Structure formats: structure tokens, C-alpha cells
Amino acid sequence: MEFTFKTLDDVDYIGKRILVRIDMNCSVDPETKQITDSSRIDAARQTLEELSKSKVALMAHQGRPGSEDFISLVQHTDILRDLGFNAKYVDDIFGPTAKNAIKQLKNGEILVLQNVRNFDGEMKNASPEEVALEPIVQELYPLFDLFVNDAFGAAHRSQASLVGFTVVLPSVAGRLVEKEIRTLIAATDTEQHPWTLVLGGSKVEDKVKTLNKLLSTGRVDNALLGGLIGTLFLIADNKVPESYSAPIEGFDAAIETARELLSKFSDVLILPEDASVERDNQRIDCGFKDMNGDPFLDIGPQTVKKYISIIKSSAVVFGNGPMGYFEKEEFATGTVEVLRAIAQCKGVTVVGGGHMGAMAVKMNLENSITHISTGGGATINFLTGKKLDLIAALEEAAKRM
Ligand code: 3PG
């Protein structure tokens, strides 16, 4: 397949100093802070193996500042070592400690830099030219010959570590980005219907915006909602009280859009019909009227039954984001059942995102799902037809090379 951007096939990398950005944002146990699934680290293997005769500095994020999964990349480095890479960690991004360690890199070594989101400017989304002015880019780029972007999971973000370096360094896509783009193009090259989206999880502010774009394409026949995005729409539809907004980060910014979407796309949006709450440390299935303010942690059995039937009779299914608080086993039922139905669907099926992808792997569903993508938000954004920021930046870089 001809790509519109350059890949590792187009450059000399042996013996070179290479800055590699990957997405190894993993699921983390909220209590122990231990990584519970490392499939996104595994997914970076091919690129890192190909660069085994180069000097590699590895850049990645984990969580967001303030979130439960915002941890350092020390465990990630240990996992890379377990995979056989000669990896070491430096607790710095672009200060003198990191720069010295980068300068001392030898061929075959991987230096994992500190979680890039420790640098405040990283959370800013702006044009590649603008974020290229951030100190993280200005301080680091003179130390490298090449930038390799393999962070497909974050391909919809226009942040300094993702697109800034493409302005100032020769830049190519890594093997995972190639594989994801090739597979997603093939999976979406179909006019078949019914076309079903299963959307759960948090990050509601992002998700209502992407839903708006995606539903406006007319491609989606059913959008089955769960998780916190499901709760948001249930509040917008006055089905559950607004007090249930407490765990929803970004609620105020998202609720109006959710109401607009409900009025514009009432025939496509399908909301949970019942709930599972936590009462006296137990899972209780109930109607919305009987929730009594107890934590709403999963979709209920009636909803599961309805979603399974829609999924199994679909020609295309895209799933992203868990249906409930799957970290607690008793509240993983909705996510598990939905994934099982996706695996049983005879059509084209794609599951994406750190959490849902990890659960699909844990359930050994790799061979029954067409593609398990490392991208959650990235994959849903890809479906809207808008070029992903990472790809657009690599295309511009290719023109300059
Ligand atoms: C993801 O998990 O979707 C990616 O790693 C991007 O993370 P973000 O939504 O925090 O930018």
C-alpha cells in the first residue's frame, strides 16, 4: 500500500540517533498503581526491534495530570526489559540529566524519558508549527537525526511530543502506525449495514464532539452507549438524576452537546435501559427509579440483552470504551458480554482503546475480532473521515524531506 507519509522503509536509521514517540498508555489498577495490561507496550515491539542498531530515546505519556493512572514510566521500562530490550529510564524529559543520558546512548540502547505529560506545555493542542516552539521540542531536536512516530493511540492529539518534532526533524511513521492505518482503511472500505458503534468509558468531552462528527456522516445506524458517556446521555435525557454527574470529568462542557445530539440523532442513539449499582459492596441490578443514589457502575441485564442482539445482527461493529467499572470484577459483566457478542458477530468487527482492547486480549478474542486496535479516540476520530493530526503532520514532514 502506498502511504501519503514516509515510513522506516524510506530512511537510513542504522547507527543514527532516533527520537521515537509511542503510545504505551496502559490500564493501571487504581489502588495498587500497577500496570494491569501491557498490550500497548507489546504493540511497539516491531518498530523497536527494527531500530535495534540505532540509539533510541523513547517518549510516551501515561494518563493525564491529576488522573488515577498518571504514573511514571518506570514499570513500562521494566516491561520493555522483560521483552528483551536494553532499556533504561531517566527521570527527566529535556533537562540536563535527560540531555546527558541521550548524548551517551549507544547503538542498541533505549532510553525511556519521563512521562511527557510532566511537562505542562504537552497538554496544549495547537498546530505543529506552534507546538514546535515549545521547549520540549526546541531543547531536544538538535540531539537527534530522525523522529519516528508510532503513537497511533494518540494520533488524534496535536501535542508537542506528537507533532512538534515533525516540523524540525526528518519524520516517519513507525510500523504500528502503518499497520493500524492499513487495517482501518480495509475495515472501513465497506458500504454494508447495519453499522453499529458501541461507545463507553470516560473522556466525555472528547467523545460528544467526536460523536457529533461521526453521526453527522450518516454512516452509523446504531450508537449503543454505556460507561460514563452513557450516564451523561441518561442525565441529558432526564432518565437519571444530575447527582450521577459527580464522577464525570468534563460534565459541564459536555451536557449541552449531549442534549443537542439526543434531539438530532434520537433514531441512532441507544441508551441503557437499566443499571447495576453498588449497594452494601454488592452488585444490584435495578431500574433507574430504584438506584437510590448508589454508584452506577455497569449497564443492567436488560440493556446487555438488547445490545447483544443489535451487535450480533450488525454488518459492521466498532467498539470503544468499557460499559462499566470493569476494574471491579462484578461490574465487568456489561463489557465482557458486549465483547463476547462482538466476537460472535459475523460482520467486520473492530475493538479499540487501551481498556476494551486489553479486555478483549484477556478474553482471548484476538482470533474472533477482525482487528483489535491500539487506538480508542484515535480510531473513532479516524471513522469521522477527518485526517488524524499525527498523519497530517507526517504528510507535511514528508513534503519537506
Ligand atoms: C488513549 O488512551 O486514548 C490515548 O493514549 C490518548 O490519551 P489521552 O486521551 O489522554 O490523550
Image (cartoon, rainbow, N blue to C red):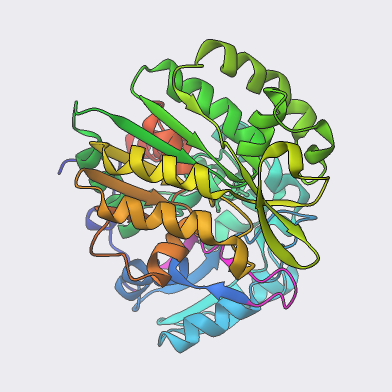
Q: Is residue 332 above or below residue 154?
A: below
Q: Position of residue 10 (x, y in %)?
A: 24, 53
At x 23% / y 27%, what residue is drawn? 193
Q: Where, by quadrant of the figure, is residue 13 drawn? A: bottom left
At x 75% / y 56%, what residue is drawn? 67
- Seen in the image, is 258 located left or right of residue 270? right
Residue situated in front as seen by the camera: 294 or 181: 294
Q: Quadrant of the N terminus?
A: top left
At x 71% / y 19%, what residue is drawn? 256
Query: In the image as oriented, which residue stretches furthest toward the left?
Result: 1
Residue 343 visible in rendering: yes
Is residue 205 rendered magenta in the image?
A: no
Residue situated in front as seen by the camera: 92 or 231: 231
Q: Quadrant of the C terminus?
A: top left
Q: Position of residue 151 (x, y in %)?
A: 46, 54
Report the span colored magenta.
Answer: 15-34
Q: Position of residue 366 (x, y in %)?
A: 29, 65
Most frequent secondary structure within the magenta stretch: loop
- Seen in the image, is 323 located left or right of residue 374? right
Q: Is residue 75 above or below residue 233?
A: below
Residue situated in front as seen by the camera: 132 or 42: 42
Is residue 18 rendered magenta in the image?
A: yes
Q: Is residue 48 above or below residue 382?
A: below
Residue 146 visible in rendering: no
